[in-house]
Amino acid sequence: MFRTTLAALVLLASPVVAAEIGDDGLHEAPWIEETFKDLREDLEEAEAQGKTLMVIIEQRGCIYCTKMYEDVFPEPDITAALTDDFYVVQLNMFGDVEVTDFDGETMSEKDVVQRWNANFTPMMMFFPPDVADDAIGSEAAIVSMPGAFGKWTTLNLLNWISEDIYEGGENFQRYHARILQERGIVE
């Protein structure tokens, strides 16, 4: 009885990380930029700040988005990377806010998400500093990461992008495996 009571008290006293939710039902974070969602302008602003443009697509009630915001993004290394290295723009998979794609076409969030064939949330998409004038987001992306992943996969992906390792020919899976082995996380 005492152990059960003690365990319950410990659980109640433990901090619970709850992600902030905005009026639109999407998660909020200090590293998400408020923009006009003109992706070419966002790309230019990212470049001006020495950052990589990252678009994160979410939807209201997404349990996998919640996992990322409560368990993964709060990790200090990941928060630092998102803050220091990435210019993050959030899109609502079913939203009506106007978005201008890289090719100049303007449409709602839900239409641009459909245009990009982004069928899963969360979806993180990363863009190079130079995008062709006629490219749409799905064509221009360096890589797209659909779904929720753990700390190491997310951190290694952010590092693979921010350190431009993708330009050297080492694909993400090989990089990720190498880093996990170097850190002694896997043998």
Image (spheres, grey):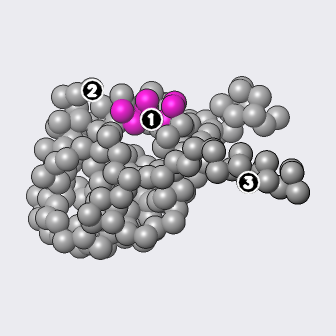
- Callout 2: SS: loop
Q: Is residue 62 above or below residue 15?
A: below
Marks 3,2: beta carbons within 8 A: no
Closer to the camera in the image, 126 or 70: 70
- The amino acid pointed to by label 3 is Ala
Between discs 1 and 2, the one toward the N terminus: 2
Q: Which mark is residue 31?
A: none
Mark 1 neighbour class, 10 Å CA radius: few under 14, some 14 to 19, many 20 or more: some
Task: Say if residue 70 shows up in the picture.
Answer: yes
- The amino acid pointed to by label 1 is Thr
Which residue was labeled with disc 1?
Answer: 79
Task: Say if residue 167 shows up in the picture.
Answer: no
- The quarter in which the N terminus is drawn is bottom right
- The quarter in which the C terminus is drawn is top right
Q: How many marks?
A: 3
Could you tell me which residue is drawn at 36 percent across and 33 percent down?
83
Between discs 3 and 1, the one toward the N terminus: 3
Query: In 3D space, how far apart are the residues under numbered discs 1 and 2 (Cα atoms)?
Result: 17 Å
Q: Is residue 97 above or below residue 18?
A: below
- Image coords of residue 39 (percent x, y): 19, 50
- Callout 1: SS: helix
Magenta stretch contains residue 49? no
Could you tell me which residue is drawn at 61 percent across and 48 percent down?
150
Which residue was labeled with disc 2?
Answer: 50
Mark 2 neighbour class, 10 Å CA radius: few under 14, some 14 to 19, many 20 or more: some
Q: Is residue 69 above or below residue 158?
A: below
User: What stretch of residues is rendered in magenta?
Assistant: 76-83
Which residue was labeled with disc 3?
Answer: 8
Mark 3 neighbour class, 10 Å CA radius: few under 14, some 14 to 19, many 20 or more: few
- Image coords of residue 65 (percent x, y): 47, 59
Image check: 61 left or right of 115? right
